[in-house]
Structures are given as C-alpha cells and as structure tokens.
Image (cartoon, rainbow, N blue to C red):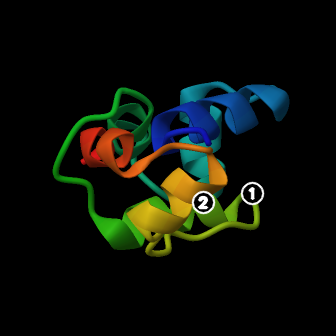
Amino acid sequence: MKTLAEFVKAERKKSKLSQAEFAERAGVALTVVRKIEQSKGNLNLEKANQVLKMFGHELAPVSIKELAKKNGLNNETSRDIL
C-alpha cells in the first residue's frame, strides 16, 4: 500500500502535471501539494481530500489489524506500523 505522499505524487505524474498545474486544477495552494508530496505534518484533511478527489479517492480510516492481515504481517510486525 502506498503512502499518501507516494500516491499523490505518482498519480500527479501520471497526469503529466507539474505541482503548480495540479494545485491550480485541484483548487488548492501549491504549498498544499508540496506538503502532501513531502509527507509534511499538520495537513488540513479537507484540503487533502480536495487533492484526492482529483483521482476519485478520499481519506478513510483503515484498521491496522486488517491492513497487517492483508499484507501477511503478524501482530508483532503490525505494532511497528504505528
């Protein structure tokens, strides 16, 4: 599973858009796109979802246990995810 930063950067590049072009189309500031792609903290969830909507996605909670199970990790390894 990709991180938010990896996902947004990969999808933006598939679209052949610069960060500035993408930000304009998504209706967010360039700094929002940069913060997301650089995994900077303190993201505004509304802005993050605005960016993700460009790819038909939105943020949603994911169970760490289910994620670990899906990826074939055991309980010890799943604790490391946190």
Query: Circle 2 sits on which residue?
Result: 52
Position of residue 40 measured from the top left corner of the image (x, y, whole percent): 24, 35
Q: Quadrant of residue 36?
A: top left
Residue for point 24% across, 48% down: 82
Element carrying mark 1: loop
**Closer-to-camera residue (34/79):** 79
Query: Circle 1 sits on which residue?
Result: 55
Residue for point 62% across, 39% down: 7
Position of residue 56 measured from the top left corner of the image (x, y, whole percent): 76, 67
The answer to whether mark 1 and mark 2 are in CB contact below 8 A is yes
**Closer-to-camera residue (79/6):** 79
Q: Residues within 10 Å of mark 2 (few under 14, many from 20)?
A: some
Q: Residues within 10 Å of mark 1 (few under 14, many from 20)?
A: few
Element carrying mark 2: helix
Position of residue 37 measured from the top left corner of the image (x, y, whole percent): 44, 31
* Apparent side of residue 35 relative to residue 59 in the rendered image (left or right): left
The image shows residue 63, relative to residue 15, as above or below, that is below
* Apparent side of residue 55 relative to residue 35 in the rendered image (left or right): right
* Apparent side of residue 34 relative to residue 51 in the rendered image (left or right): left
State the separation of the CA atoms marked 1 and 2.
6 Å
Q: Quadrant of residue 61?
A: bottom left
* Apparent side of residue 29 relative to residue 16 in the rendered image (left or right): left
Residue for point 62% across, 45% down: 71
Residue 74 has which mark? none
Residue for point 26% across, 54% down: 43
